[in-house]
Image: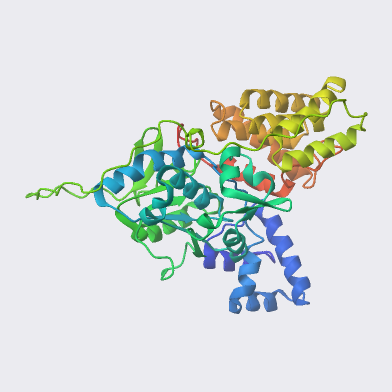
Amino acid sequence: MTVLTPFKQLVHQRCGLSLEGMAEARLERAIEQLCHAQATQNHATLLDKLAKDAALFDQFISQLTVNETYFFREVEALQWLADEHLPRQLAKQGGPLRLLSAGCSSGEEPYSLAMLLMETYGERAKSLFRITGGDVDQQVLHKARAGIYSGMAFRALHPALKARYFTPVGRAHQLVPALTEWVRFCPFNLLATDHPALGGPFDVILFRNVSIYFDEATRRDIQQRLKPLLAPQGILLCGVTETLGNDLGVLSLQEEQGVFYFQHAAPEPSRHPLPLPAATVTAPTMLETAPWEAAEVRPLPEAPPEPSAPPPPIPREKVLKQAHELLDNNHFDAALQLISPLLEQAPWCVDALLLAGLAVRWLQQPQQAYEFFKRAVYVAPECWPAHFYQAELLRQGELPDNPVQRQRGYAAVVRLLETTPQASGALQAIQPPLPPGDACFLAKRYLDEPIAIQGVG
């Protein structure tokens, strides 16, 4: 037994998080910060305080998870819900339908669904749907309620939707009240036995990109606890790589239009079935195009005119840092314009290759992004961010998946960062876009997952 063991046991008992392997580094840092805050090095005292002080335990938990999320993540499943499944359920049973984002983190997932439903139904969406987000981390729930976001949270959000639903606040963006007042957030421990504040039963439970934190026994336990929260005809959706790992016999796996989900097993047919009444609610007419392509989307403000004369030469390091900042603020085109001349002068600059790959990825050019990351790895095999993002292009379905190649990429990340936990990845001017500890943690988890079912939203 190590000094970490009793902390692992307490966290696992309270909320099911598995803190083995690379997660131990996060646990060690959290314990160090707790020792400093409580002015004691006595671990028994700290454990006693954590067990008795709910607020202190909440602060401790917030340091143990990787809250890496963004708007419209794995959007295909959300689009299927808005366009196909939810209208069909409204036609069958009327509203309001109840939707839960379990493990919602800072709120990007439930707000993404709210935007899609608002685009489809307008203000009627608020009366047709009740959206709830729940998470064990009180700090991220506070951020979700505030609705203020910046940087890479917008990496996959169409500019028209960003203009419609957000207003600038300094260097960040504030979500409009129409959404923050509609979506409700409340504490939700997946291992708790009772959730009086949560409500339900729910017609849809989103449990996406959460189960990577739990071992198989805990995932089964969580599904047993989610099952009573699921309405008789309700569905539970997992993340794109998590479906097989959650097919544990608790709920029945189903598929429609390439989207996989779980629901209660179908009951045995009645010997004397009664005729069903005709549906009284009809599905609304769906937009044939994506929501942001509809005619009512307001035009975006025109971009400022380009300067008439090229700017004077800027030192390479300053260019890279400026491009990195532009990328963090979702100015992907502007970042690429800065990087492109630099790459012409220094085609094997690892920093520039990585930034170019990220820029074109979020400009929906995954194949070109893959080539940039590939060149970065060729120049510097120790560039773990390039390995990581190459694998992500395959895992996220942006390119046709190659399981062997994907696993090789994540394995390279783990190998490099287990050897040197704070490795820069051969980057000289910029910091890695993802903290090394988080990248290694995620890569290790993805390596442990079974091969994903293709087409999962």
307 or 315, which is in the foreground? 307
* Residue under the image location 50 percent in, 52 percent down: 110
- Left or right, 369 with respect to 126, comes to right
Q: Position of residue 432 (x, y in %)?
A: 77, 42
- Left or right, 111 with respect to 345, comes to left
Colouring convention used in this rendered image of the protein = rainbow
Residue 348 seen in the current view: no
178 or 439, which is in the foreground? 178
181 or 63, which is in the foreground? 181
* Residue under the image location 64 percent in, 62 percent down: 62
Residue 394 lies in quadrant:
top right
Q: Position of residue 439 (x, y in %)?
A: 68, 44
Q: Is residue 333 above or below residue 125?
A: above
Q: Is residue 92 above or below residue 395?
A: below
* Residue under the image location 53 percent in, 32 percent down: 397
Residue 190 seen in the current view: yes
* Residue under the image location 50 percent in, 35 percent down: 451
Query: Number of callouts in the render?
Result: 0
Q: Position of residue 173 (x, y in %)?
A: 66, 51
Residue 306 lies in quadrant:
top right
- Left or right, 413 with respect to 142, comes to right
Q: Quadrant of the N terminus?
A: bottom right
Q: Position of residue 6 (x, y in %)?
A: 62, 68
